[in-house]
Amino acid sequence: MGKLTMLSLIFILYVFIAFNCISLEAFKLGPERQLIEVRNSSQSDDTVRVDPLDRLKKYRGGYDIRNKHYWSSTVFTGKYGYAIAVVWLLCGFLYGLFLLVTTFCCKRSRMKLRKRVPCQKQYYLWPFTSAIFITILAVIASGLVLGGNTRFHRRADRVVDIIIDTADGASDTIYNTTRAMKEMSAATSGGGGAAAEATRFLTSTSKSLDIRAADIERQARKHREAIEMGLRIVYIINTVIVSLNLVALIALSVCGILKFRRALYWLIVLCWILTILCWLFFGIYFFINKFAGDTCAAFESFQQDPYNNSLSLILPCDELVSARSVLDVVSSGIYRLVNQVNKNITKSYGNFAQLCQPFSGPPEYAYRPNNCPSNAIRIGAIPQLLSMLTCTDPDCIGGILISVSDFNAIKAYTISIQNILNVYPGMERLVECETVKDAFSD
């Protein structure tokens, strides 16, 4: 095997090892890269990158996954890998021309130099030894890259699961709230005055929240499918290319040592092409590395200000702010209702009993379910208490006479109110975006 061919083999092996070592840095997503990677969240808005779609002008729009200029400028950060791939392609083309010229034009001169010198065997010993050693390093590096690729894919899936599952949890919370509102609306339907107004409010609000929940669910499903498909494609292609490169390099070394010239030349061409693809993937992973850093900064910014962040496309905290007014109306309404019932009880029966007031006074109307006196009656216990103290039969003795319709209405009201109180903490955490903050802080 010629010296030039052996040097080509060693050089390809060396480049492949270098590519593997650099690629491992791009796989860092997880414990090595924390969400608080960028200390100052404002840095996510200070992104300055060259945008190839805008005549190479600077992109300054910050992290925005909805903006094509953000994606083009971020993808362009892998230009070093793309450029090296192009240079490698040109070098391979020129090297191929050089081999053709030396093969067809210098046959005679090579025939005259076939006589071996005594030290030729030792002269070729070090290239063979180097090829074997570097092949072993290439195998180790390939194993590390494949392992890093698997870990990267698993951690990226975990981040996607956090985002999408949080969005799904938000839609489930909204659906639970609207279900309780619909039950209360059904309980208040048929009445006039304030009851009719409450029914209209509950009906319109539940419809609006249902639309919002369906939109969150649809956006989460759409983005999950797109992100998972992209991650799967990158994972499969990278695994296939690195595996093929590894097999080809081992075969290249074996053919070089055993002097299978024809197979050796074809394997050199194949390895050269695979190395070009590897450098392209280096550029892609360099871009992924930048995107991961931007995403970490966006997560930190999201924790500090969830209402003004591009992640709101999937986690729409800013859109859920409108539900705060609904919570305020519900809390103030229940507060006034409980106060009115307690006044009526005091007026008619003295301090016989009081309902538990689950909300603090105005203007906060904060939910405080555990601040009730020990002898207070919780709203959820009213139906059972009514069954013990009242009767609907005119002939009953010892109970408070109440009509069947009134009994059923009170029971429906109290159950509906208790259902709203059950979902109130989750809805409040959703409006404050606490569920999202907790998901990313775990």
Image: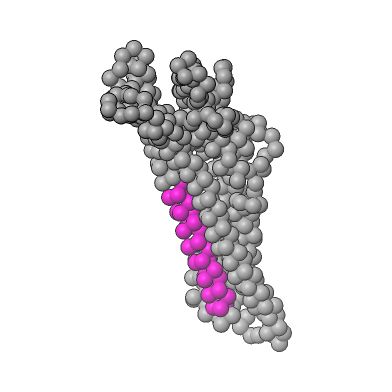
Q: Nearer the viewer, residue 396 or 281?
A: 396
Left or right of 342? Residue 414 is left
Above or below 212: residue 438: below
Rendered image quadrant of residue 190: top left
Which secondary structure type mostly characterizes the magenta part of the structure? helix
Residue for point 71% across, 87% down: 118
From where the camera sits, is residue 420 visible?
A: no
Residue placed at 53% from the left, 29% from the top?
Answer: 376
Q: Residue 56: x, y in percent?
A: 56, 34
Percent across and percent down for residue 1 are: 59, 78
Q: Is residue 406 left or right of residue 148?
A: left
Front residue of 262 and 340: 340
Q: Residue furthest bottom?
A: 118
Magenta span: 227-256
Magenta span includes 237 = yes
Above-or-below relation of 352 to 11: above
Residue at 36 percent of width and 25 percent of height: 400
Q: Point out the residue furthest to the front here.
A: 397
Q: Give the quarter of the image for residue 258.
A: bottom right
Residue 202 visible? The answer is yes
The count of marks equals 0
Along the line of sight, the residue nearer the viewer: 397 or 249? 397
Task: Spot the residue most to the top.
Answer: 193
| Spot occupied by residue 193 in the image (x, y as percentages of width and height) | 34, 12
Looking at the image, what colour scheme do you see? one colour
Residue 9: % across, % down: 60, 70
Answer above or below: position of 208 versus 336.
below
Residue at the spot 62% in from the left edge and 57% down from the top edge: 24
**Could you tell whether 258 is left or right of 415 in the image?**
right
Q: Quadrant of residue 259 in the image?
A: bottom right
Does the segment drawn in magenta span residue 219? no
